[in-house]
Image (cartoon, rainbow, N blue to C red):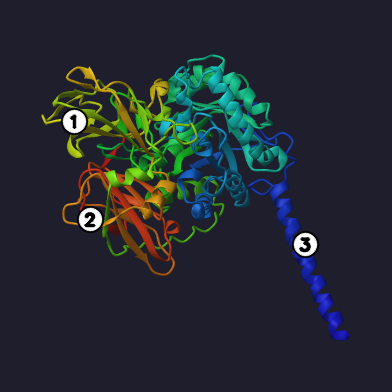
Amino acid sequence: MVVLRIRNAHKRKYALICLCIVGFLMYRYLRMPAGGRRMSRKVGLSANSSQLTLEGEAFQILGGSIHYFRVPRAYWRDRLMKMKACGINTLTTYVPWNLHQPERGVFNFHIQLDLEAYINLAAELGLWVILRPGPYISSELDLGGLPSWLLRDESMRLRTTYPGFTEAVNTFFDKLIPKVVPLQFKKGGPIIAVQVENEYGSFAKDEGYMPFIKEALQSRGISELLLTSDIHNTLKSGGVDGAVRTVKLQKLNQRHIQHLAAIQPNSPTMVMDYWTGWYDMWGDLHHVLPPEDTVSTVREILRRGMSFNLYMFHGGSSFGFMSGALGHPSYKSLVSSYDYDAPLTEAGEYTPKYHLLRDLFSRYNRGESFPDMPALRNKEAYEPAIMYQHLSLWDALSFTERPFKSVRPVNMENLPVNNGNGQSYGYTLYETTITSGGLLRSGGNVRDRALVFVDRRYIGLFKRQSVELAVPDGKGRRTLSLLVENCGRVHQGKDLDTQRKGLVGDILLNHIPLQDFTIYSLDMKPSFIDSLYQAPWKTLTEAPSFPGFFMGRLFAFGYPSDTFLKLPGWEKGVVFINGLNLGRYWSIGPQQTLYLPGPFLNSGINQLIVFEELEGDYKVHFEYTPDLGMAADIQ
C-alpha cells in the first residue's frame, strides 16, 4: 500500500510538471513575441511614425525570404533554424496560386504546399511572418505564379478588374485567406503584415485593381498591417491607400530612399526586397553578388534604422516546370536552380555571405547570443546510374490522354485535357500529313521551341528567333511532327496576357497553312510518368531513337543523402526520380547539375527516368558539390 501511494505521488508530480510545460508553451505561443516579451496583441505592427512599432514598442524587421514550395518539406525546419541562427527575426514567403490551384475547383494545400504548417513552424521557432499572397507574385515562376488556365479566356486581362480575373481571384482567396486569418498576430499567430499584390507599379493597367485586392484581403479577415512593394521609379503607381509602400533594390541609392520618403512622408522606410543575388537564364552566366557588397549594403540599412528583407535568404529549387522566363529584350527561359547566390545555398549550406551577415547582426544586437548553427547534412556521390532501358517518344504516346484532332493548331491552354483546364507545362506534339517538301515557316507561332520530324526522322529545330526550315522532298503522304516545348511563361512585364504556349497560330508549308492536326498533350505529370512503367521498354541499344525516355537505377544504402545529378554528354531534357520531376537540364548551361535532395530518395533502389530530346550518354553521374556554371558578378 505504501509503495502504491509513492508511485501515485510520483505520477501526480510528473503530471503536474507536464501540465506546467504545456501551459508555458501555449502561453509563449499565444502571448509572447519572437523576442520574448509579453504583448497584449491588440494593435500589432504599426507604421504611424518614422519607425515601425509592434504593440507600441519600436521594432525593426530583419527579414529573410524562404519559399516553402521551393524547399522539400523535410527540410523546412532545418532551413528556418539556420535563418534564426543568423539573427533574422522575420520570415517572408510568397504564395503561388498556380501550384495551389492547378485546375478550376481543384485546390492543394497538402504536404509540400501545406502553408499553415509552414507558418506554424515559423512561430514555433520564434519567427514573425510577412505573408505575400499575391495573387500575382512574380518570384521567377511561370506566369508570375498565376494559373495558366486563366488564359483559356481569349479576352482575359490579367491583373485588372476584368470580371473573369476578379472572379477567379475571389474563388482562390475564398480558400486561401480563411487558412491564414487565425495565424495573424492579433489572433495569437506570427503573421505581422500582409503584402498587397506585388510590383504593381511596373504593370499599372487598372486604377481600380489594387483597391480591389486590398478589399479582397480585408473583407475576408486580414487585419494586420498592409504593405505594397515596388522598385523606386514605380512606387507611386504601385501603392494603394491604407498600405505602407516599400521599396526593392540591390544598391542603396540615396535618391531612391528620398523618393520614397517624399511619396510617403512621416512613415518608416522599409526595403521589402534587398536582392542578395540574382536568378540565372539558360545560355547565360551564373550571377553572383560578392559577400562584401551584400554586407556593406545591409550594414548601411541597419545604420539608418530601416527595416529590410533579404530576398532570398535561401532560394532553393524551382523543381519540375516551375521556372518562368524573361520576355525582354529577347525571350530567355530560367534555369531550374533558384540558388540566387543567397546566404544559404540551394542545398542549405552556409556561405561566406551567411557568416558575414551573422557576425554583423550579432554586433548590431550588441552581442546578443543567437541559437547555435545547425550541423550540415552529409552529401553523397553515388555510383553512376547506367541507363539500361529505352522507350521511344512515339511508343509513349499511347499513355497520354486521348489525342485531340483539330483543323488548325490549338495552343496548350485551350486543349481539351485536364478536366477542361488545358495544358499548363511540358511538351505538346502536333502531327499532320504533307505530300511535298519545301519551305516550312513558323511565322513566330512556335512557343517556345519545336523539334521538327518527317516520318519521325528529325529534320531541324524551330526557335523563337528561327522561323524557317527546309523540308526535304519525298514521295507520297508523309507525317510532319512538331514537338513543342513550353520553356516557361514570362514572370513579369506587360505581356502576361499573351503567354499562351504550343502552336499559337498557323504553320505554313510553301506559303500554305497546314491543317488537320492530331495533337498529343505531354505535360509529363507524375501520373503519366508512373504509367510508363507499363510501357513496352526495350533493352538499350547502341543507337536508340530520339526523343526518348531512358531508365536507370540509383542505389542508396542506408539513410539517403543529398547529391547533385550531372549529365555530361546529354543535350536537353527533363529528369524524373521516383516519379518526381526534378527539373530541366540543358548542355548550354550555365547550370550543369540538378540538386537531388535526400528526402526524394528511397533507401535501396530508386527509379531514374531521363527524357532526352536529341542526344544522350546513357549514364547519369552524381557529385558531392553543385556546378551552377561560370560565375559573373552582378553589375
Residue 591 visible in the shown view? no
Q: Residues within 10 Å of mark 2 (few under 14, many from 20)?
A: many
Mark seen at residue 216? none
Q: Which residue is mark 3?
A: 19
* In contact (CB < 8 Å): disc 1 and disc 2: no
Q: Is residue 617 left or right of residue 11?
A: left
Looking at the rendered structure, the kind of residue marked 3 is: Leu
Determine the secondary structure under disc 1: loop
Total numbered badges shown on the rendered structure: 3
Q: Amino acid at mark 2?
A: Tyr
| Rendered-image quadrant of the N terminus | bottom right
Residue drawn 68% across the image and 31% down it: 223
Relative placement, left or right, of 209 versus 145 is right
Counting residues from the N terminus, which is met first, the one under dot 3 or under dot 2? 3
Upstream in sequence: badge 1 or badge 2: 1
Q: For the residues marked 1 and 3, what is the alpha-carbon distance in whole angstroms? A: 81 Å
Q: Residue at x 25, y 34 (%)?
A: 481
Against 126, is 224 above or below? above
Question: Mark 1 to mark 2: distance in Å?
Answer: 34 Å
Residue 457 seen from this side: yes
Q: Amino acid at mark 1?
A: Arg
Give the residue number, with chain letter if any, for mark 1. Answer: 477
> What residue is rendered at 51% in x and 35% in y?
103
Question: Which residue lies under the disc numbered 2?
Answer: 618
